[in-house]
């Protein structure tokens, strides 16, 4: 990004409540801000956009049908088929989630089993037991796509409680279910400066915002290092905002809570202009060099011709004198 500014920055403060909604779902995560006056770059300028700060409500659920992570599939000895339970959407910590799953398992146990969930904070793992494992086994199918397995710290697998030791998670308990960041995107402001790993392609991301642990509160995000994204277009008529998880198709559902973001538009001297100027000067230099070479060649040729003419005249004069 060029560093030579051509004029002052423009700050844009945007509240979600003021946006023209563009999403089909009522997630309050996207919308359009139409500018009263267009922002236009001169021919020798390039536009840059950066996120100055954002106020984000931690109102979105970590477990929900929208996130596709609210199912647990199990069966007990004597069951013909698996039972799939739906966990109510919400923002859970690991103890609250364990308590809710225990409640659902016991309510749907065909063998009147009770379940014990023990969280080991030091190892960040969960142990699950049933009340009669040597007689009545419990098998969990953690291979389904909408499983809550990552919350409980299990890999994609089928695993059974067959002993009094129960089963213990084999990966870290992750109460964020890998959704530990949200991404602020500006879909209508095109650039070729940002790549994201989920697609390997150029992206409309302007900022990655780590999710604060405190739920049901607002948190302020201010980038530690300002990233200025160079835009391809010369004019901004409106700004589309879309807040998602890393996968752009996974919208953040703010549950109708409002967010605010502050953007900065910067004007820089276009490096393409400098390139064109250098190319122009190089072309002129080549033309002048060529003209000089042609002139020098013409002078040499004229000198050669003059010498031959002088020699011819002197020869004739000597013949006449003789």
Image (cartoon, helix red, strand yellow):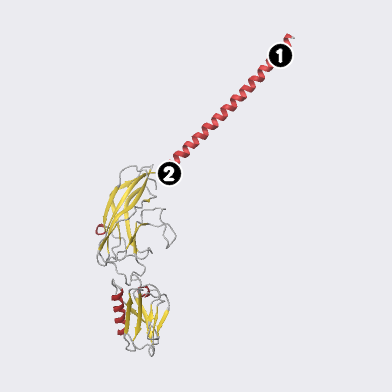
Q: Residue at x 65, y 20 (%)?
A: 307
Residue on which the image places disc 1 = 316
Classed neighbour count for the residue bearing mark 1: other residues with Cα under 10 Å, few (<14), some (14–19), many (≥20) = few
Residue on which the image places disc 2 = 272
Q: Is residue 226 left or right of residue 308?
A: left
**In the figure, residue 212 lies in which quadrant?**
bottom left
Viewer-proximal residue, 210 or 300?
A: 210
Q: Give the residue furthest to the right.
A: 322
Vertical comparison of 63 with 232: above or below: below
Q: Are the residues at dot 1 and dot 2 in contact (C-beta closer than 8 Å)?
A: no
**In the figure, residue 95 lies in which quadrant?**
bottom left
Classed neighbour count for the residue bearing mark 2: other residues with Cα under 10 Å, few (<14), some (14–19), many (≥20) = few
Viewer-proximal residue, 287 or 34?
A: 287
Q: Residue at x 59, y 24 (%)?
A: 299
Q: Residue at x 62, y 22 (%)?
A: 303
Q: Quadrant of the C terminus?
A: top right
**In the figure, residue 290 lies in which quadrant?**
top right
Vertical comparison of 232 with 147: above or below: above
Element under disc 2: helix
> What label sits on residue 154 in the rendered view?
none
Of label 1 and label 2, which has the lower sequence position?
2
Element under disc 1: helix
Q: Residue at x 59, y 26 (%)?
A: 298
Vertical comparison of 202 with 304: above or below: below
Point out residue 284 in the picture as x, y percentages from the top left corner.
49, 34
Point out residue 12 in the picture as x, y percentages from the top left corner.
28, 51
- In space, the residues marked 1 and 2 are separated at their CA atoms by 66 Å
């Amino acid at each position: 990004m060029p560093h030579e500014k051509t004029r002052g920055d423009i700050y844009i403060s945007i509240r979600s409540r003021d946006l023209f909604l563009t999403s089909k779902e009522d997630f309050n995560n996207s919308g359009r801000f139409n500018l009263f006056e267009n922002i236009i770059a001169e021919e020798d300028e390039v536009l840059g956009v950066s996120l100055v700060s954002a106020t984000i409500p931690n109102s979105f659920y970590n477990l929900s049908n929208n996130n596709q992570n609210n199912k647990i599939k199990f069966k007990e000895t004597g069951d013909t088929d698996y039972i799939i339970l739906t966990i109510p959407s919400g923002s859970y910590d690991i103890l609250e989630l364990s308590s809710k799953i225990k409640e659902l398992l016991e309510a749907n146990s065909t063998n009147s089993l009770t379940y014990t969930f023990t969280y080991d904070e030091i190892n960040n793992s969960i142990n699950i037991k049933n009340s009669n494992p040597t007689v009545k086994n419990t098998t969990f199918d953690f291979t389904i796509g909408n499983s809550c397995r990552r919350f409980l710290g299990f890999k994609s697998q089928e695993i059974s409680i067959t002993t009094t030791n129960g089963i213990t998670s084999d990966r870290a308990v992750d109460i964020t279910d890998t959704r530990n960041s949200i991404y602020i995107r500006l879909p209508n402001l095109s650039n070729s400066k940002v790549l994201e790993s989920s697609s390997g392609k150029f992206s409309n991301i302007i900022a990655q915002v780590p999710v604060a642990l405190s739920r049901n509160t607002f948190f302020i995000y201010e980038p530690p290092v300002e990233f200025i994204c160079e835009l391809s277009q010369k004019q901004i008529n409106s700004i589309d905002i879309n807040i998602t998880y890393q996968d752009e198709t996974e919208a953040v559902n703010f549950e109708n809570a409002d967010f605010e973001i502050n953007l900065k538009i910067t004007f820089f001297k276009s490096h393409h202009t400098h390139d064109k100027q250098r190319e122009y000067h190089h072309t002129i230099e080549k033309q002048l060099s060529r003209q000089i070479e042609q002139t020098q060649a013409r002078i040499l040729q004229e000198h050669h011709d003059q010498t031959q003419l002088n020699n011819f005249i002197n020869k004739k004069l000597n013949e006449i004198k003789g």
